[in-house]
Amino acid sequence: MSSSHPSDVAETRELAPYACHGPKSRGRLHAETQRPDEASQLASRTPFQRDRDRILHSSAFRKLKHKTQVFVYHEGDYFRTRMTHSIEVAQIARSMARALRLNDDLVEAVALAHDLGHTPFGHAGEDALQSRMAEFGGFDHNEQTVRVLTSLEQRYAGFDGLNLTWETLEGVCKHNGPFAGDAPVRPAIAAIDVEFDMRLADHPSAEAQLANLADDIAYLSHDFDDGLRADLFTINDIRDLPQVDSILAEITKTYGDLPVERLTHELIRRLISLFVGDMLAQSSTNLAEIGVTSVEDIRTAGRPIIGFSSAMADDLETIRDFLFTNMWRHYKVNRMTSKAKRVVTDLFDLFMSETNTLPTGWQSRDGVAIDDLEVVDRARLIADYIASMTDRYAMLEHQRLFEPGPILR
């Protein structure tokens, strides 16, 4: 492990004692030689700001603009993609971090990175890839994010991956919480744990916990917007949902009947404010009750510190159940899901049986030809290739390989 920053780098705002401080970072896995012209630049950016910037400049992040959130990119210009979702998560998380005096740079880095391992076509693509990879170690998008950050991004001369700080990697590895008891640890996460000691049994930092719940706030709010725009349900269908009912009544009382576009936007912004307010209040209460005074107190508290009140958590679960039935499993979405699974399955099966159809750059790994790899490693290479695709590229590859037509397109 190496130091990741000059010793005199200071945060530019007052942080709580239980926040992660850049100058106290546990560092980066690989030592980085600083050029003379980098000294002033590094001194002006904290380690977590550098992490955020590396994530934003990564090829995996750019590809998120054409990866499915719920709707495939060509179904409409206004529907959310993985990129717009990630930006919205980062914005919500950063605002809450400031309110709790947490490190907003670290929160932003974790939020922007959390979906980098998603396949094309969202969870449909992941399900198809997991099915095909079941006998080769399986596939999990959170583990794939770790693979992207630690090995698959190959941009720097001195190391594979982005060489992020320990704290940012912790937030990604523990996106769904600590690995307690006999909980299985995916191979990529286990590997970085061996090299970097990720303390997998401990809870993640408050910043990581906040980024995870900001993800929930973002998609549970914004999926109403996309679902209404796609005519999967109507305003009347959601009027009786908890929190939604009182907000809609208040909007109508104040503004009367509004066009659906204005009404939807007003609903979403107020929902987000409501969820954020509840989380800030409950988290502040939790911090006070436990008497948290350090980052170590957060990690060893034995339970999450950042969270919703029990009543709000129940309401969010009711909203999630509605969206599951009426949006995520709507027959129109199911039809695209079915097509997406076929595309991913067809590509995987063909590449496994005819490895010479892979692009040249994907026909070897670490200098070993794909046909000379163990079958498990061969399957993992092919899964990495498919997972790296955007929706658009996956469909083009499928057309190139399965439909008669020109080869060079």
Image: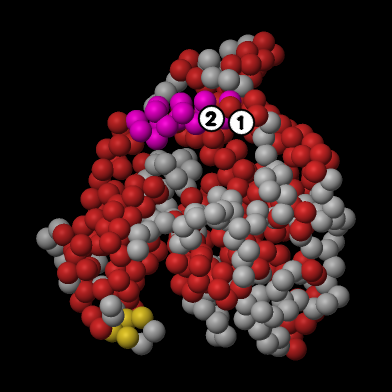
| Coloring basis for residues | secondary structure
User: Which span is picked out in magenta?
Assistant: 315-330
In the picture, measured across the screen, residue 351 lies left or right of residue 260, that is left
Does residue 389 appear in this view?
no
Splitting the image into 4 quarters, where does residue 279 fall?
top right
In the picture, measured across the screen, residue 141 lies left or right of residue 242, that is left
Q: Position of residue 74 (x, y in %)?
A: 36, 46
42 up-or-down from 304: above or below: below
Residue lying farthest to the front in this orientation: 181
Which class describes the residues within 10 Å of circle 2: few (<14), some (14-19), or many (20+)?
A: few
Read off the residue under disc 2.
Answer: 317
> Which residue sits at x=67%, y=45%?
304
Read off the residue under disc 1.
Answer: 313
In the picture, measured across the screen, residue 233 lies left or right of residue 331, that is right
Q: Secondary structure at mark 1?
A: helix
Splitting the image into 4 quarters, where does residue 402 fall?
bottom left
> Which residue sits at x=82%, y=49%?
292
Does residue 84 appear in this view?
yes
> Which residue sits at x=22%, y=68%?
351
Q: Would you say the residues marked 2 and 1 are in contact, meaning their CB atoms lie under 8 Å apart?
A: yes
Question: How far separated are the C-alphas under marks 2 and 1?
Answer: 6 Å
Quadrant into which the C terminus falls: bottom left
323 up-or-down from 252: above or below: below
Q: Amino acid under label 2? A: Glu
Q: Secondary structure at mark 2?
A: helix
